[in-house]
Structures are given as structure tokens and as C-alpha cells.
Image (cartoon, rainbow, N blue to C red):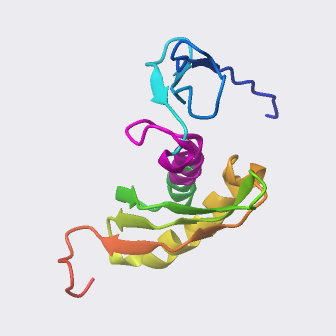
Amino acid sequence: MFGEHRYSVRSVWTGNRGSGTTGYRDYDRAVLVQIDGKPDLLASADKPFRGDAARWNPEDLLVAALSECHLLSYLHACVQAGIVVTGYEDDASGLMVEDGRGAGAFREVVLRPRVTVAEESMRDAAMAAHEQAHAWCFIANSVNFPVRHEPVIVISGAREGGPA
């Protein structure tokens, strides 16, 4: 089944300190991101761009979207391949480079999923399922920079550092 899916988000700037954008340092980068039926998300610019480091920024959200999309696509790929996943964690990172003219772009995002599977016999298929997950990930298919994967497969019940 093919279909179109629309997503609606409301972003509200809450950083007017009383004088609006009269100067670069005169306003806060605070933003409230809202979606009907979901908790509000407190956002801002990244700290180097005069933002609040305690709030989510667009760069964080992009890396998070790629990480979560791969995770969900991966779980689906594993179900289809008969792989039993019992745990999944990802320490993802992204590299964004400024161009010196006030703009910038991501150069890459690296996902580092650590997947726990039920049996040793699932290890190779679990590793291969990352390629299928990447092909299915809507977000990875929408960006114009590489999304690399450095997965680790762990066997459920195997000791860390011991034979798996």
C-alpha cells in the first residue's frame, strides 16, 4: 500500500526579551515545539549560536530522527528475518560544518547501534539487517549526506569481554 503522510508541527518563538530582534544579542533563541496530543518540546539554537544548551536544538533533533528511524526500521527488518532482538542502544553522532558565510551543512551522521540478539546463530543476519533498515529508513532517504553505521552485535546472556 502506497500513501502520502503529512506531519504538522507548530513552532512558537518564546524568546522576545521585550525589544524583539533589534540586535543579534537582544533576543533569546527559545522555541516551543508543539504537536497536538503530544508533550511540548522545549527547543533552542545550539549553544555556539547563542542558544540554551539545556534545550533540544535542530541539529540534535536531526541526529535523533535518524537514530530512531534506523532503530524502528531495523526492528522491522529483524522480525521479517526471524531475528529475535532483546536490546538495542545507539550512540549516534553527527558532524555539521559551518561554511564561513553564516550557513552550514551536515557532512555525515554515524549510527553506532549496539544490538543484543537471542542466539549466536542470529549474529550474521542481525548484522546484515542494518542494510535493509538503512534502505527502509524514511529519514535517511531524505537527507543529502551519508548516514554510516558501525553496529555491534551482542548475544543475550553472553558476558562482556567474553566469548559471544
Principal secondary structure, stretch drawn in magenta: helix
Q: Residue at x 47, y 25 (%)?
A: 41
Q: Residue at x 43, y 19 (%)?
A: 39
Q: Please tell me whether residue 138 is drawn above or below residue 125 in the rendered image.
A: above
Q: Residue at x 54, y 56 (%)?
A: 74
| Horizontal and vertical percent position of residue 68 | 52, 47
Q: Is residue 156 left or right of residue 3?
A: left
| Horizontal and vertical percent position of residue 124 | 49, 78
Write down the quadrant of residue 77 in the picture: bottom right
User: Which residue is farthest bottom?
Assistant: 163
Q: Is residue 20 left or right of residue 74?
A: right
Image quarter of the C terminus? bottom left
Q: Please tell me whether residue 115 is drawn above or below residue 103 in the rendered image.
A: below
Q: Is residue 32 left or right of residue 39?
A: right
From where the camera sits, is residue 4 visible?
Answer: yes
| Horizontal and vertical percent position of residue 57 | 53, 40
Q: Residue at x 57, y 73 (%)?
A: 128
Q: Which residues are magenta?
A: 47-71
From where the camera sits, is residue 72 visible?
Answer: no
Residue 128 or residue 49, whichever sits in front:
49
Residue 65 or residue 55, whichever sits in front:
55
Is residue 1 in the magenta section? Answer: no
Q: Please tell me whether residue 37 is drawn above or below residue 101 in the rendered image.
A: above
